[in-house]
Image (cartoon, helix red, strand yellow):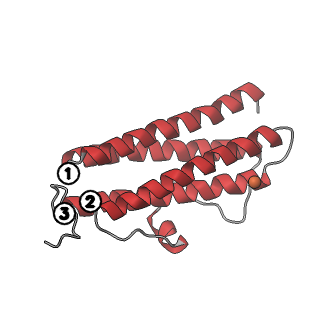
Amino acid sequence: MSNLTPNLGLSGAQMETAIGLLEKLLADEVVLRAKLQKYHWNVTGPQFHPLHETFEDQYTALSETVDDAAERIRQYGALAIGTLAEFLQHTRLQETPGSTPDTRGMISDIVNDHEHIIRSLRVDIATAQSEVQDIGLEDFFTGLIQTHQKMAWLLRAHLESTGL
Ligand SMILES: [Fe+2]
């Protein structure tokens, strides 16, 4: 084993599993970030200002998450995927090219995607525990569940408070 191969007490198969989970997560975060930016650009109407800001807050925060997920792939010794084609190939989220929802539709689309990522992370945490057996990966995923729960709640609360 060369000094450049990570020696984390994990087998090659365990690191491959971790990399596979992280590639899906990375792709999901990139797709959600792109959607948030699209809605930041295109939101209109009386809720323009708060939503323009909230969408920006969220895509800015997710840029950190994207970077952390990609760098975590590197920590298991693999190269990070980094093209739009690869992100689309790995994501579990759906894009709707050619259509832009109304304000309520934007919020519910983003909330649904946050919750989709939360549900995926729940399954991925179980895999990180049982197969990868890496507390570092579990911890990373657990923190992200909290991040996405908070973001989903903020948008839901916006829907409720404005009666959209
Ligand atoms: Fe902007």
- Identity of the amino acid at label 2? Thr
In the image, is residue 52 above or below residue 152? Answer: below
Residue position marked by numbered label 1 in the rendering: 131
Residue position marked by numbered label 2 in the rendering: 17
Q: Dot 2: within a 10 Å radius of its alpha carbon, few (fewer than 14), some, or many (20 or more) residues?
A: some
Residue position marked by numbered label 3 in the rendering: 13
In the rendered image, residue 86, in percent from the top left (x then y), is placed at 47, 71
Residue at 29 percent of width and 57 percent of height: 18
In the rendered image, residue 96, in percent from the top left (x then y), is placed at 64, 61
- Identity of the amino acid at label 1? Glu
Mark 2 to mark 1 CA distance (whole Å): 8 Å
Mark 3 vs 1, N-terminal side: 3
Quadrant of the rendering where the N terminus is positioned: bottom left
Locate residue 48: give its quadrant: top right
Residue at 26 percent of width and 59 percent of height: 17
Asked if one can make out residue 92 in the rendered structure from this viewpoint, the answer is no
Asked if one can make out residue 65 in the rendered structure from this viewpoint, the answer is yes
